[in-house]
Amino acid sequence: MSNSVEFYFDYGSPSSYLAWTQLPRICEQYNAELVYKPMLLGGVFHETGNASPITIKAKGDWMGQDLARFARRYSVPYRMNPFFMVNTLPIMRGVFWARREGVFDTYNRAVFHAMWVDGVDLSDPKEIGRVVSEAGLDAAALGEAIQQPDIKKELIEATNEATTRGVFGAPTFFVAGEMHFGQDRLDWVAEALSRDRATETVG
């Protein structure tokens, strides 16, 4: 996909949140489209044999400090969710409902903020409903939709697509077919967009 950033994410990934806070600005700078690619990170881990860094104590401790440093660098609010690791299956299914209803931007913003600013337990259906309602969305419709076979299938297929493309964690980005992993690689994403735009200008 030319002149775009494909953004594979899961709301349960703090690095996905940090990337999300920066990607719109980067894409605007290079006149690129930000393409959201939801996936179930637990499914990706299962298929690839990967695991969350938090499963290794020393790495998890370091990562917690590093994420906070990046949040300060980006000047964005950030709080490590006290319920981490959160089962994100319901809220990731919710992405597909939100897209169908034309409310993805509102849903996306509400869920990312609830998870990584407010520290909400988004594995709890009542909390999901509260967050969605406070964002002005229909919590009852969401709750019903995410139990439907077609919504479940969409998330499965999206996750399978991710692993087929070589994705092993979140966030992962593709620019002109080139893969970049981790929110600390956003400079590489920007560089790839710069090259892509330069090529289009020459062409």
Image (cartoon, helix red, strand yellow):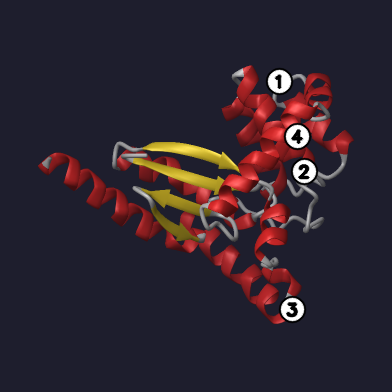
The residue pinned by badge 1 equals: 136
* Quarter that holds the N terminus: top left
Q: Residue 131 in the image: x percent, y percent?
A: 76, 32
109 on left or right of 137: left
**Distance CA(mark 1)–CA(mark 2):** 22 Å
User: What residue appears at the point 78 percent right and 38 percent down from the top-left corner?
Assistant: 90
User: What residue appears at the point 46 percent right and 44 percent down from the top-left corner?
Assistant: 6
Q: Secondary structure at mark 3?
A: helix
Amino acid at circle 3: Lys
First-in-chain label (1 vs 2): 2
Q: Residue 187 in the image: x percent, y percent?
A: 36, 59
Amino acid at circle 2: Leu
The residue pinned by badge 2 equals: 89
Callout 2–callout 3 Cβ contact below 8 Å: no
Question: Which mark lies nearer to you, 1 or 3?
Answer: 3
139 on left or right of 96: right
Amino acid at circle 1: Gly
**Distance CA(mark 1)–CA(mark 3):** 39 Å
User: Which residue is outermost to the front?
Assistant: 164
Q: Which mark is residue 57?
A: 3
The residue pinned by badge 4 equals: 152
